[in-house]
Amino acid sequence: MPKPSNFRRSQRRGLTRREILQSSFMGLGLMGIGGGLVGCGSSGTRDGEGGGSVTPIKGRLDFPELDSTPDENGLLIPKGFKSRVIAQANQAVGSTGFRWHTDPDGSAVFAAPDGGWVYASNREFLVGGVNAIRFDAQGEIVSAYNILPGRLTRLNCGGGVTPWGTWLSGEEYDLGVVWECDPFDTTGRNVTRWSGLGTFYHEAVAVDDTTNVFYETEDRPDGRFYRFVPDAANVGGRPSETGKLQALRVITGDDLNLETARGPWPVDWHDIPRPNPGAIGTVLQQQTRYQVEQTTAFNGGEGIWYQAGMVYFTTKGDRRVWALDIAAQTLEVLYDDAFHQPDPILDSVDNVVMTPGGDIIVVEDKGEPNQQAVAIKADGSIAAMIQLVGHMGSEVTGPAFSPDGRFFYFSSQRGPGDGKGAGSAGITYAVEGPWFTP
């Protein structure tokens, strides 16, 4: 099984869930009207504190507006900022000689004891896997290597960071599972298949570091929202791989697809009798999402994020951002583009990540040439962080900040051009600048 890497956890306090909801969503008018406030991701609450010269992210997002002219890499980025290509499909990463994968998807950054960090990236293709790039404290490439072999896995889409410092990579197909791997293991052998997390169309995972309960999204039009409760939580360490897989039920008579449906609603959880139904179970329509009829279907689960007692996740089919209050066991809609017609703030939602200061970053998956990473700032304002120009048929994937907040990493899954097919393209960028102010 993967062993926790030897780097320190940040002790800096993040915003409470009440502060996050008040500042981020009340300012945008995203909360339901008339109700009181009672209480989005790929990497939990890690600030990424390490040794060396890196100072962890402090403050909140505060950056200039996008330049009106694409830069040398064909991106619209904040004025005065600089972009560079970190890796390109089927080409060597820097001077390492290691060839980067096509179809980059879910990603995260892991801080190292020497002040550097690792950027881990899924490959969403039939031959999948996870590759990693090691950076020094100045953001220069040191090495690149594989941490989850493609021969073991396929269609690695989203994922999540564990509190003990490993990467969870989810397979997005009917027999998909979640793999755990160590971002600092250059051999690619330190991997574990998490059967307890179920077999289904996995998208992303978030772990509550106060309980070690896992929360999971499923990328199907009738997908469920799951949690895995380990038999032994071992908070502060790695939990047991055995436990209960459960699916969520929203307790309401309202139709969740109605434009007026916002919540909050009470929820409960139901045990999945057969978390790993296998190929025969799939043929017999006994997939996890069908095993407990009363559980609630969500239209295309995507990114997920845990912070300060809340779990935030997105659904692409109805373009919503949701918030689950763990203590209250309630669920509500925080954003729906139907609330903002004819000019919605966002018309596509996919990966969601949060900064320690409560800023929410959503990347777009529209299949159109010009797509963005958008910041919903903690003060309620909204701004585009970057924009792809001329990337037809692609999507923005893998958003993550370096531990010090200087570099914002992301990928264009298909790269620039007219929409190259899966398995042939992809490009990963870094945009450097003063993203945060104290």
Image: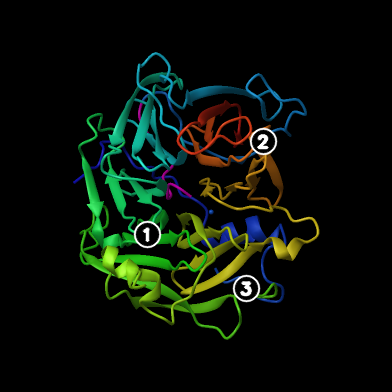
Dot 3: within a 10 Å radius of its alpha carbon, few (fewer than 14), some, or many (20 or more) residues?
few
Residue 320 on the magenta span: no
Name the residue type under label 2.
Gln
- In the image, what residue occupies the spot 44% across and 82% down? 294
Mark 3 vs mark 1: in front: 1
Which quadrant holds residue 269?
bottom left
Q: CA distance from mark 3 to mark 2?
A: 30 Å
Dot 2: within a 10 Å radius of its alpha carbon, few (fewer than 14), some, or many (20 or more) residues?
many
- Nearest the camera: 384 or 61? 384
Q: Earlier in the sequence, mark 2 or mark 1?
A: 1
Mark 2 vs mark 1: in front: 1
Circle 2 SS class:
strand
Residue under circle 3?
Answer: 257
Q: Position of residue 187 (x, y in %)?
A: 22, 30
| Quadrant (top left/top right/bottom left/bottom right) for the C terminus | top right
- In the image, what residue occupies the spot 69% across and 38% down? 370
Residue under circle 2?
Answer: 387
Residue under circle 1?
Answer: 174
Q: Colour scheme used in the picture?
A: rainbow
Q: CA distance from mark 3 to mark 1?
A: 24 Å
Placement of 349 over or under 369, stated as above or below: below
Q: CA distance from mark 2 to mark 1?
A: 33 Å
Name the residue type under label 1.
Asp
- Magenta span: predominant SS is loop
Residue 12 is left or right of residue 382, and the answer is left
Residue 44 on the magenta span: yes
Name the residue type under label 3.
Asn
Q: Position of residue 434 (x, y in %)?
A: 61, 29
Marks 3 & 1, CB-CB < 8 Å contact: no
The magenta region covers 41-51
Residue 277 visible in the shown view: no
